[in-house]
Image (cartoon, rainbow, N blue to C red):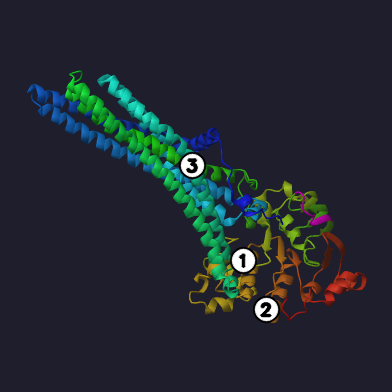
């Protein structure tokens, strides 16, 4: 199977500015009215702040002329209170909207990730995919609302302040803009560096998540191999890369913030020098200089908002690029109609399903070797069919193609005489029970695992299947019975118990086609014998396909399909193949088909 290297699997290509803005608008568009409300509140607060220096100028002029200042003070107080309330309301609306944007992005990502084609899941790193749902979407919070509103309010208030400052004194405005322009050029050069650092930091966070997922997925193996330190070093190396790029981004953000303050402070000194001279010469009154200096300090906020918006945009663009990459991954088709439940499918088609492969070929990707080369066989409804062959012969791939986990690259796979590509996925999988080779058990309770594929199963159904699979004794000794947690991936259970739970889960589904991929490999002789009887009983009303490495399982089959190097070599009963097929006779005599009572290797 093709597994991409880490850089190929986890790296996200940067988007052009137009594509980034288009993707960003897609997230903001459903909340555009809330963003507009937040923007209006922010502009109202900014307008209040913009009027305060003029009110101060009026206050100074009144004091200079000996007039009353009570009305001006009252108006200034009301102005401060109203602008504060408006800003608070705007902040709440924007923060709430930002959380809604993040929620929508996460729901979209989760829905897409859980519909990915298996080939995409095999190619990508699970930890990196998870980091896109968690850390990457978090960065949308700032860029989707605060950055947008900060950019608009910063630009509007900056322009408004400049217009008022020009009205107060054009000479002082020219001095201010000259200083700001010089510092602004340097700030513009810094912004792309923040984006690069953010993108690399997010990629490193994805690598860290991948490393942790890798360790927790095989924790016992890591401990038994004495590999804790090596794996710790691997994850810490990714964490260190994230730290290094994060620090680099923080450095450039500090430079950007310093440039902002430096511009205002230098402009203040220049205005103070030039303005003081103009006041001394009588060209402007002192109240104008005071108002101008207040506006100069007021400029810090809109300039800071613009710088903050640019910084958030650079960080958000890196996250959007990684999130958007998920949209390019292939997903399984969504059924437009209501999914057919297993019980409903059974009413419509009570008979066991038939399976047929017509010259099927398959490979995992371009340039990779064929796993199937003209595979051709037919399984009528009912009974048990076993698939045997050396490892890598393509036995488990038969089940993957029947379930449409992968699409055949040539030929046809038919269930009930109908090409699986013509089935609705929900309907196809509703009539199939599938027990994987490693019999996975999910974190949760035993009950949740049993009814995972049949959420409508009754307590009577559960008791019956527990008895058939010899799990009733396990339930009795568990402290909370069916409601006992089984641990991460069923770590509180033995391998044989996990296999029996997986089989019971499939039987509860009441499938018309049951696929068992080495489903008894970890069972002892007693439990294997019991489950052989269950499988034989199930085969009377269901078509059972089984990949088996035990001779005892094979001899019970109604037919055996011998596979070798991606082809069907022979089909027949145990006795017929033993006499007529040399490969089967060799397999039957080796450990690849282990006699009953001995665990498979």
Residue 262 is tagged as none
Q: Which residues are magenta?
A: 366-374
Q: Can you identify the residue that label 3 sits on?
A: 193
Q: Is residue 457 visible?
A: no
Residue 385's spot in the image, x, y percent?
79, 65
Residue 80's spot in the image, x, y percent?
21, 34
Q: Looking at this view, name the residue that lies furthest to the top.
A: 283
Residue 527 is tagged as 2
Classify 10 Å Cα crowding around label 1: few (below 14), some (14-19), many (20 and above).
some
Going from N to C along the chain, the mark reached first, 2 or 1, is 1
> Judging from the image, what secondary structure is the residue with disc 2 in?
helix
Residue 101 versus residue 192: which sits nearer the camera? 192
Residue 252's spot in the image, x, y percent?
43, 44
Q: Can you identify the residue that label 1 sits on?
A: 440
Instruction: Tell me, yes or no, whether the two marked residues, 3 and 2, touch with CB atoms within 8 Å.
Output: no
User: Which image quarter holds the N terminus?
Assistant: bottom right
What residue sits 39% from the left and 30% below the top?
A: 182
What residue sits 29% from the left and 40% below the top?
A: 88
* 571, above or below 122, in the image: below
Q: Is 73 contained in the magenta span?
A: no
* 169, above or below 469, in the image: above
Q: Is residue 331 visible?
A: yes
Residue 16 versus residue 452: which sits nearer the camera? 16
For residue 458, which quarter of the picture?
bottom right
* 144, above or below 392, in the image: above
Classify 10 Å Cα crowding around label 2: few (below 14), some (14-19), many (20 and above).
some
Residue 220 versus residue 99: which sits nearer the camera? 220
Q: Is 373 contained in the magenta span?
A: yes
Going from N to C along the chain, the mark reached first, 3 or 1, is 3
User: Which image quarter holds the C terminus?
Assistant: bottom right
């Amino acid at each position: 199977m093709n597994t991409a290297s880490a850089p190929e699997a986890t790296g996200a290509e940067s988007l052009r500015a137009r594509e980034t803005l288009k993707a960003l608008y897609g997230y903001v568009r459903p909340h555009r009215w809330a963003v507009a409300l937040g923007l209006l509140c922010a502009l109202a607060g900014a307008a209040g702040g913009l009027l305060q220096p003029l009110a101060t100028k009026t206050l100074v002029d009144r004091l200079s002329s000996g007039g009353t200042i009570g009305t001006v003070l009252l108006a200034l107080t009301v102005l401060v209170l109203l602008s504060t309330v408006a800003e608070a309301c705007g902040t709440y609306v924007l923060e709430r909207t930002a959380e809604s944007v993040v929620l929508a992005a996460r729901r979209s990502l989760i829905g897409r990730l859980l519909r990915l084609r298996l080939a995409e899941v095999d190619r990508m790193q699970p930890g990196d995919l998870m980091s896109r749902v968690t850390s990457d979407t978090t960065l949308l919070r700032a860029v989707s609302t605060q950055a947008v509103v900060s950019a608009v309010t910063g630009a509007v208030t900056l322009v408004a302040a400049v217009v008022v400052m020009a009205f107060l004194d054009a000479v002082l405005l020219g001095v201010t803009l000259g200083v700001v322009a010089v510092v602004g050029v340097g700030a513009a050069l810094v912004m792309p560096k923040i984006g690069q650092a953010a993108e690399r930091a997010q990629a490193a966070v994805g690598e860290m998540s991948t490393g942790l997922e890798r360790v927790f997925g095989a924790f016992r193996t890591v401990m038994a191999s004495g590999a804790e330190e090596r794996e710790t070093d691997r994850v810490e190396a990714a964490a260190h890369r994230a730290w290094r790029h994060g620090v680099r981004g923080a450095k450039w953000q500090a430079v950007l913030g310093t440039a902002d303050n430096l511009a205002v402070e230098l402009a203040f000194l220049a205005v103070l020098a030039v303005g003081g001279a103009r006041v001394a010469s009588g060209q402007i009154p002192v109240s104008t200089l005071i108002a101008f200096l207040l506006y100069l300090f007021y400029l810090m906020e809109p300039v800071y908002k613009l710088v903050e918006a640019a910084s958030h945009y650079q960080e958000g663009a890196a996250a959007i690029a990684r999130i958007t990459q998920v949209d390019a991954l292939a997903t399984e088709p969504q059924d437009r109609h209501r999914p057919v439940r297993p019980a409903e499918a059974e009413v419509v088609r009570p008979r066991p399903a038939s399976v047929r492969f017509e010259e099927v070929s398959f490979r995992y990707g371009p340039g990779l070797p064929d796993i199937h080369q003209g595979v051709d066989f037919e399984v009528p409804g009912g009974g048990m069919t076993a698939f045997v062959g050396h490892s890598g012969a393509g036995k488990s791939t038969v089940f993957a193609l029947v379930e449409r986990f992968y699409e055949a690259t040539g030929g046809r796979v038919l269930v009930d005489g109908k090409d699986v590509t013509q089935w609705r996925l929900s309907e196809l999988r509703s009539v199939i029970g599938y027990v994987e080779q490693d019999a996975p058990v999910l974190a949760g309770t035993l009950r949740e695992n049993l009814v995972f594929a049949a959420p409508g199963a009754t307590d009577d159904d559960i008791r019956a299947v527990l008895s058939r699979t010899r799990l009733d004794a396990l339930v009795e000794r568990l402290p909370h019975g069916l409601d006992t947690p089984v641990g991460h991936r069923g770590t509180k259970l033995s391998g044989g118990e996990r296999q029996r739970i997986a089989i019971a889960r499939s039987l509860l589904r009441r499938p018309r086609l049951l696929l068992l991929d080495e489903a008894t490999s970890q069972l002892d002789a007693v439990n294997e014998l019991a489950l052989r009887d269950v499988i034989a009983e199930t085969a009377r009303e269901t078509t059972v396909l089984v990949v088996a490495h035990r001779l005892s399982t094979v001899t019970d089959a109604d037919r055996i399909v011998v596979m070798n190097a991606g082809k069907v070599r022979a089909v027949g009963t145990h006795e017929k193949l033993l006499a007529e097929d040399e490969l089967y006779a060799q397999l039957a005599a080796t450990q690849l088909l282990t006699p009953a009572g001995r665990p498979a290797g």
